[in-house]
Image (cartoon, grey):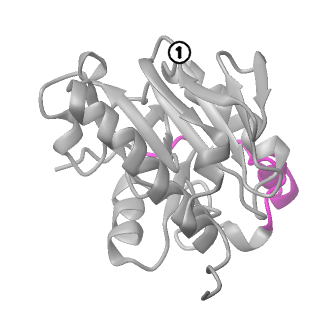
Amino acid sequence: MAIAIAPPKSRHGTVAELVRDLGDIPLSRILLIPPPGTATEADQLRMCESGDRLVELIDGTLVEKAMGAREGFMAAALIVLLGTFVRKHNLGIVGAPDVIHRVVDGRNRLPDVSFTAWATLPDDEAHLQPIADCTPDLCIEILSEGNTRAEMDRKRKEYFRGGAKLVWEIEPEERTVAVYTSPARCKTLRETDTLDGGKVLPGFAMSLAEFFAEPQLNPRPRKK
């Protein structure tokens, strides 16, 4: 059973301050029940487990995860590729978009895809709890229309502050992957490049041309 952590006292005097702090995200993603600044992990779990919405917990405020069908299919394709490699070498665990991670105090995030090495887990059953009490070594975000640059900058900083070693931000429209090894250190790969796991997943390599050519990421093939 997850331990309910009391939300921090709200530091926002106005809605504008709250929205700005969250990264200027659309108002439609900020839940008003429970009132911003008062939500707990129990509220987050109840919302996520109901299947109604996937929400992140940010300093006592529930924020709906920005994700559409296209991003979900892309996450599924990545999980298959990463999962096959990780399982073959028994390296750790691969998470889906509905896995909740305690990243830093008062902030529970849901990366679109994640990898956590066995050695990173704080105990043998940390990944078997309703909320994983650790930040993944690799956090992957598939950018959606509802995401903002300020939001992603904040999220990336939290991932690295929590202990992440690598962050991939995938831009489906441009078919690029921004590879971060720190909050500000980035290399952008294009469709002609190969994405590798670096020191986090040594030996893992994926042709972006082949990945973006996955049938489920493209229009239905025409019958011959």
Q: Is residue 66 above or below residue 107?
A: below
Q: Position of residue 58 (x, y in %)?
A: 58, 47
Report helix, strand or loop for mark 1: loop
The quarter of the displayed image where residue 68 is located:
bottom right
Q: Which residue is mark 1?
A: 198
Residue 204 can be seen in this image: yes
Amino acid type, callout 1: Gly
Instruction: State the extent of the magenta-drawn residues as a range.
Output: 6-26
Q: Nearer the viewer, residue 122 or 33?
A: 122
Q: Is residue 17 left or right of residue 170?
A: right
The residue at the point 43 percent across, 29 percent down is: 135
Residue 63 lies in what quarter of the image?
bottom right
Q: Is residue 56 above or below residue 145?
A: above
Q: Nearer the viewer, residue 61 or 203?
A: 203
Question: In the rendering, at what x and y percent does residue 168 appear?
Answer: 63, 34
Residue lying at 64% horizontally and 16% vertically, measured from the top left? 181
| 7 inside magenta stretch | yes
Quarter holding the C terminus? Answer: bottom right
Rendered position, 29 above or below 42? below
Q: Magenta stretch mostly in which secondary structure? A: loop
Q: Nearer the viewer, residue 9 or 140?
A: 140
Label 1: few (<14), some (14–19) or many (≥20) C-alpha neighbours in 10 Å: few
